[in-house]
Image (spheres, grey):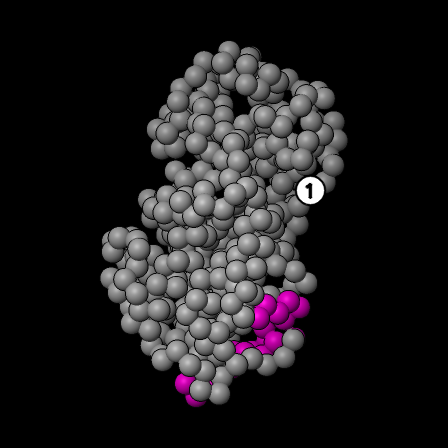
Amino acid sequence: MGFRAPFRIGRDGMDADFLIIGGGIAGVSAAARMSELGSVILLEAEDALAHHASGRSAALFEPRYGAPAVVGLSMASEAYFRSVPGVLSPRGLLLVGKVEGAEAFEHDLKAMAFDRISVDEARGIVPILNPETVAMAGYASHAEDVDTDLLVQGFAREARGRGAKIVTKAKVTGVAKDGAGWRVESSAGSFTARMLVNAAGAWVDQVALLAGVRPLGFTPYRRSMARIPAPGGHDVSRWPMLFGPGEDWYAKPDAGALIVSPAEEDLMEPHDAWADDMVLAEGLARYEEMVTEPVTRLISNWAGLRTFAPDRVLVIGPDAREPSFFWLAGQGGYGFQTSAAASRLAADLIGGRAPELEAGLVTQLAPGRFG
């Protein structure tokens, strides 16, 4: 499925060819790719890039995680990540389950291509696992850490290197058609561009409303995290990420400590999220049930909003009714691991090039699927 660019590259009095709203991984990667096609302005409401969901990610590249279309994007992103030294590093993923969670365990074992291992083997990898509660285990070596800062800054550097303007502290307050393009009012001033790229994370439907474009029904959900000291004084640096069946909790080594999440999905309005103490306590209890070392204190906690389209698949493409309004939205928990292919697809569609992705996948990602 191809898409011819709805405009001729060339500003015709506009400030830029493309104006991107949102400075998370989606917006920054898009800025890098679109700077190959024309002039770019990116507006980020906060003081720095990747402040919200992108800066609060568990940062794991697990390409088999998500719906089939998400997996397709993740798989297509892998070659780019491996081409940039330091973006990916070994981590692994250890699935551990109780007897009463066997059905969810078997589902995840198959869906995410784990190798079944014994509980003793699992305890050889993570010695604090509780043999009285852990009844089954699976291991996947293909899961890797993502250096999120390296990825964000690399895309930003690429964009700036081609003349893109990245403006922080630029909260968008108004969006309107302006002749052949768009005028965007923000706390950092007024900007015009021929195409508007909506990469605003939890705020994408709000941006659409400002622009007079029909929202697509995106839903932000809170995901909380707690950082705890390394359990029992162990060196956790080589431990894999721990994962409960059905993703009802997870834990991951991070800078000598462990981050633990209840993996909740609590519906939220777009805002600068914070962790809920009760939800954290419940998640920590699920984690503690599977290990021998109790949680004695928290070092810190935080939360982010993971924003999904109604079908939990990313939305990438021009709006069905307003082709100069481009959606790059609904990253959910997959923003980093899909960023390379998602941003390339966006640039291919806008540039009128045949997408590198196969046509069926492009159709599954298109905004027009919502009617």
Residue placed under numbered mark 1 in the picture: 301
Which residue is at the front of the view, 131 or 25? 25
Residue at the spot 49% in from the left edge and 29% down from the top edge: 93
Q: Per the image, is 230 magenta? A: no
Label 1 secondary element: strand
Image-based side of 9 in relation to 28, left or right? left
The answer to whether residue 255 is seen in the rendering is: yes
Tell me the magenta residue range. Answer: 165-187
Image-based side of 114 in relation to 58, left or right? left
Magenta span main SS: strand
In the image, residue 96 sits, relative to residue 307, either above or below, namely above
The answer to whether residue 305 is seen in the rendering is: no
Provide residue 65's location: percent of width, then percent of height. Answer: 41, 39
In the image, residue 30 sits, relative to residue 274, either above or below, namely below
Provide residue 262's location: percent of width, then percent of height. Answer: 58, 37
Q: Amino acid at mark 1?
A: Asn
Residue at the spot 45% in from the left edge and 45% down from the top edge: 83
Is the C terminus in the top left, top right, bottom left or bottom right quadrant? bottom left
